[in-house]
Image: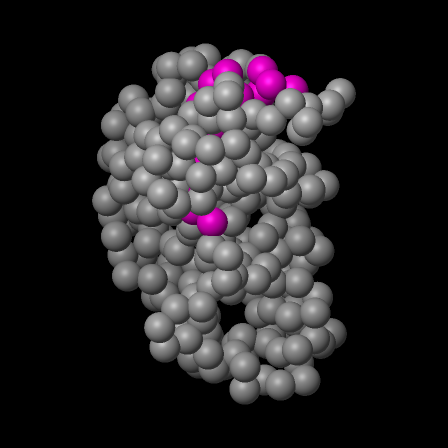
Amino acid sequence: MCQLVLSFAYLKSLSSIAPILRIIPTSGSNPVVVLADDMNEYVCKYIGRTPAKKLLIEYLCSAFASIWGISVPEPAFVKILAEHVPGEMLSNSFHAQYFEIPTIGSLNYPESKEIDKSVIASWRSKPSQIKWITNKEDFLQIGLFDLWLANEDRNHNNFNLLLNPIIGGIEVMAIDHEKCFNSGIIDPVRPPYQLTVDESILSSDIVPLLFRQGDELDRLKDVILGEFPGWVEACQNQLVEIIQLIPLEWGINREEIEEFLNSNIFAPLWRDETEHNFRQYITDSFVNR
């Protein structure tokens, strides 16, 4: 499990220095890859309207993940300049105005690979590959993080996890958080609701591949849940400074967001429900396997 960080890593504000390199076709956001003025490539999500709640959610989740010590691609605010949006890329579904406000970017890791069905099959046929994962316990922490933030987009059909080669092994990194808060519902009058077991990564085939039922898994669950209140409290304590950094161009009502988070995901009842489901969903992952 990642070491407890409890400190928000401030995001850099960057600008593009060259035309968009490529579009990554996905079933959702179709992010673009750009070279920024820190000389690194970033995978950038954008939106053509305000309030830019999709970008807000990616930002908030990156901030909270850094406090939890969860490995995610380094995030940044990236302004893609108008002269760096190639005309030949424009179409009925891809407009120049998408980039009139800052995007939310994630550092590109070209050597990484997303976990998919082929990776799962490979782990089944050669379990020794799992030994190269340096932070496999973080998988459980990510599952808890997703339950806490009601992330509907990381589940048994869509893992949203990267395997990133590092010195001495492979690191698991969490990506793509725009479907947190029940697919982007941040509204003070619409409280979040808990994920079902099928909506959680904890119900996927990955859990019984990485862990065995027994005392060691029970110990890991207890350790993670022992840290859980501290992670939540640290996020809440730093909420004001996190919200203050939201780009003004996104058109976000900061007071509304603060009210929503304090009234819902930081509420003791929500934390208790999350803890209960975390334990239950891990147990359910071993059923009929």
Does 12 sit left or right of 161 as displayed?
left
Picture quadrant where residue 207 is located: bottom right
Q: Is residue 165 visible?
A: yes
Left or right side of 171 for 46:
right
The image quadrant where one finds the N terminus is bottom left
| Quarter placement of the C terminus | bottom right
The answer to which of 147 and 252 lies nearer the viewer is 252
Residue 125 sits in which quadrant? bottom right
- The residue depicted at 60 percent of the width and 26 percent of the height is 86
Q: Which residues are magenta?
A: 94-108
- Residue 206 covered by magenta stretch: no
**Residue 105 within the segment the image draws in magenta:** yes
* Residue 272 is at least partly visible in this image: no
Counting from the top left corner in percent of width and height, residue 47 is at 57, 23
Residue drawn at (36%, 43%) of the image: 39
Q: Number of callouts in the render?
A: 0
- 200 relative to 271 in the view: left or right: right
Q: Is residue 168 above or below residue 275?
A: below
| Residue found 33% across the figure and 30% down from its top | 13
263 or 95, nearer to the observer: 95
Q: Position of residue 242 (x, y in %)?
A: 31, 30
Which of the colour schemes (rainbow, by chain, secondary structure, one colour) is used? one colour
Residue 98 screen position, x and y as percent = 58, 20
On the image, the x and y values in percent for residue 202 come to: 58, 60
Residue 277, quarter of picture? bottom right
- Residue at the spot 60% in from the left edge and 74% down from the top edge: 208
